[in-house]
Image (cartoon, rainbow, N blue to C red):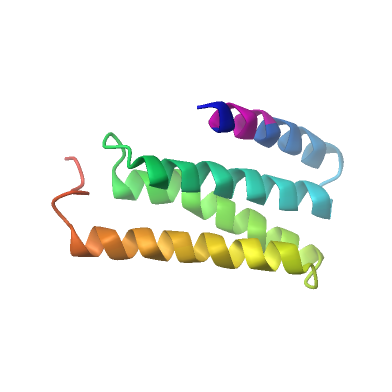
């Protein structure tokens, strides 16, 4: 909860900064890191109210877009490349668990 609150505030301020400077690498990188941190926290909590489809559409895709934009602005920033790789691995691991345990993560209809 505390980290989620901090991430939400950070995301808000990064969005505000991007409205002034849409090509700011630091803002895109910070936004990507804040979003990915919030997502990995949710993955670790195993929120039962969350369906897989909703989770991917609302959270994962925007974070990936932020990482890609940051890397398009600065391809040589090793820390962002590393964090994007770790984030991708976490999402892949989650998807692998969903595939193995479909009843645990069954979509709500």
Residue 52 in picture, x, y percent from top left: 31, 49
Residue at image point 80% right, 73% down: 76
Residue at image point 55% right, 32% down: 4
Q: Residue furthest left?
A: 103
Residue 98 in picture, x, y percent from top left: 26, 58
Residue 85 left/right relative to 27: left
Give the vertical position of 14 relative to 32 (above or below): above
Residue 55 in picture, x, y percent from top left: 39, 45
Name the residue nearer the viewer: 47 or 58: 47
Give the vertical position of 105 relative to 78 (above or below): above
Q: Is residue 105 magenta?
A: no
Q: Which residues are magenta?
A: 4-9
Residue 83 seen = yes
Residue 65 left/right relative to 39: right
Q: Is residue 7 magenta?
A: yes
Q: Quadrant of residue 108?
A: top left
Q: Residue furthest bottom?
A: 76
Give the vertical position of 100 relative to 28 (above or below): below
Predominant SS along the magenta part = helix
Residue at image point 57% right, 52% down: 63
Residue 23 seen = no
| Count of numbered marks | 0
Question: Which quarter of the image is occupied by the C terminus?
Answer: top left
Residue at image point 33% right, 42% down: 46
Residue 77 in picture, x, y percent from top left: 79, 67
């Amino acid at each position: 909860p505390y980290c989620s609150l901090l991430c939400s505030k950070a995301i808000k301020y990064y969005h505000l900064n991007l409205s002034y400077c849409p090509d700011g690498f630091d803002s895109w990188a910070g936004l990507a890191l804040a979003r990915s941190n919030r997502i990995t926290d949710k993955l670790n909590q195993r929120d039962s109210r969350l369906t897989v489809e909703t989770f991917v559409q609302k959270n994962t895709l925007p974070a990936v877009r932020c990482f890609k934009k940051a890397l398009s602005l600065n391809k040589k920033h090793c820390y962002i490349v590393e964090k994007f790789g770790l984030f991708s691995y976490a999402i892949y691991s989650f998807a692998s668990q969903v595939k193995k345990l479909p009843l645990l993560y069954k979509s709500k209809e």
